[in-house]
Amino acid sequence: MSNRNYELDCLRGIAILILVLTHFLRVYFPSKIPTSPAFPTAVVDLFGIISGYLISTITVKKIDQLKAEKFKLILFIKAYFVRRFFRIYPVAIVVFIFVLICSVVSTNTKYFSTPANTLEAGMHLLTYTFNYYFMEAYHSVALAPCWFLTFEVQFYILFPFFIFFTKNSRQRIIILLGLLFFSTFIARPLTMYYFPVSGLFFTQTRCDSVIYGCLIYYLTTQPWFEAMKISSTGNAMLRSSVMIFLIMVLTSIMSMSFSISTAFAIGNILACIIVIPVIFNRNVLVFPLFLQQGLTAVGIRVYSWYLIHYPIFLLTKECWDYFNYSSEIFLRAYSIFVLLLAVLATEILYRLVEKPSIEKGRVVSAQIVSDTPVGYVDILIDQDLLSKKSKDFA
């Protein structure tokens, strides 16, 4: 029996479909949605919370176990970074090359900017500073989703060292709560005051989500919390309806009459309320079988979806503008074609790049520890079990 949490896949599938639909409307029917760049970025915080929780699940106990055995700890961290590399970079590089080619052949820099500007954006991607750069200096939205990728990579790099240099769970929780307080009440208000648009994507503005994810992990390790898990029995459709309602509120929270700083704070708390029951797989997202399977499939491919959809929308929009069609009926038919093309591009990217790269990361990380003492094999096996449980999630 698989240990995979398909409800988590389903939640990610719902979240990415909301983002994809929003970006599609922004490109093709901009009058249909709010013009604020903050809409609907609060949905992305779902991804941050899930990543924070899962990376904590995979790394915290192992690093604590291996602190007394430095050689094994180094191997574990090395294997961790190798798997992160193969999980993230092959897909990102392929999408970047695709965007770069589009910028070369494009006749309208409105959509893909210039090759020089795209290459400059690529340098910021490689140096993990893209979320500080793209709103001010990157003259396109083709790579816009990479702001969150940059932020996640920053977290992936720093988190193992945070665990290593802290002594115990109590100290870590205090530090995480302090960082959460600093981000919510000091860093974000100041950042949004001086950078009201680009500040939406700065690390100090958006780090709440991964911090909440880490705190949820520590919450789940408490014995008293186990007793509070909601029952998996009862009216599943009612619970699913409540969850969908909460997701819709989260989606629209940035367009409500809150300040940006307040909306982010409320949005992260709401995202935690959504994620926690899903983490425990308590049948809170249950749909008819065909819909459940479809959302799960989308959730498994969420990373490819996230990176490729905007370039596809921009490329097809440039083609539409080039041929200068004006028929509203034809535009709607063309929109269906564009969405199907995005699905096809995602599937190709997932099957030919993302999925093989994930497997390659597993193989290479296993090779890293292949010459270690026999006692370490148990640790590797345990790590693989965790990886299978959260396969493709983080």
Image: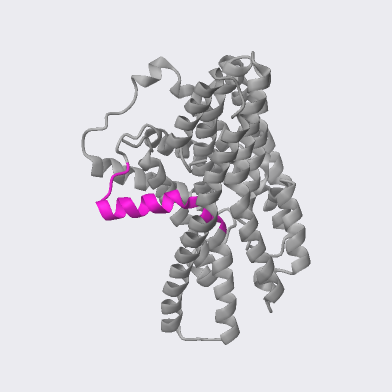
Q: Does residue 2 appear in the picture of this structure?
A: yes
Q: Nearer the viewer, residue 264 or 275?
A: 275
Q: Nearer the viewer, residue 93 or 27?
A: 93
Give yes or no for residue 304 being in the magenta stretch: yes
Residue under the image location 56 percent in, 34 percent down? 366
The correct choice, above or below, for 329 with respect to 10 in the image is below
The dominant secondary structure in magenta is: helix
The correct choice, above or below, for 280 with respect to 199 in the image is above
Residue under the image location 54 percent in, 33 percent down? 55
Query: Where is residue 240 shown, x and y percent of the image?
Result: 30, 44
- Range of magenta residues: 285-307
The correct choice, above or below, for 389 with respect to 355 in the image is above
Locate residue 91 relative to residue 100 in the image: left or right. left
Locate residue 150 relative to residue 15 in the image: left or right. right
Query: Where is residue 47 shown, x and y percent of the image?
Result: 51, 43
Locate residue 239 relative to residue 15 in the image: left or right. left
Residue under the image location 36 percent in, 47 percent down? 245
Q: Nearer the viewer, residue 361 or 88?
A: 361
Give yes or no for residue 254 being in the magenta stretch: no
- Residue 87 is drawn in which quadrant? top right
Query: Where is residue 11 shown, x and y percent of the image?
Result: 40, 45
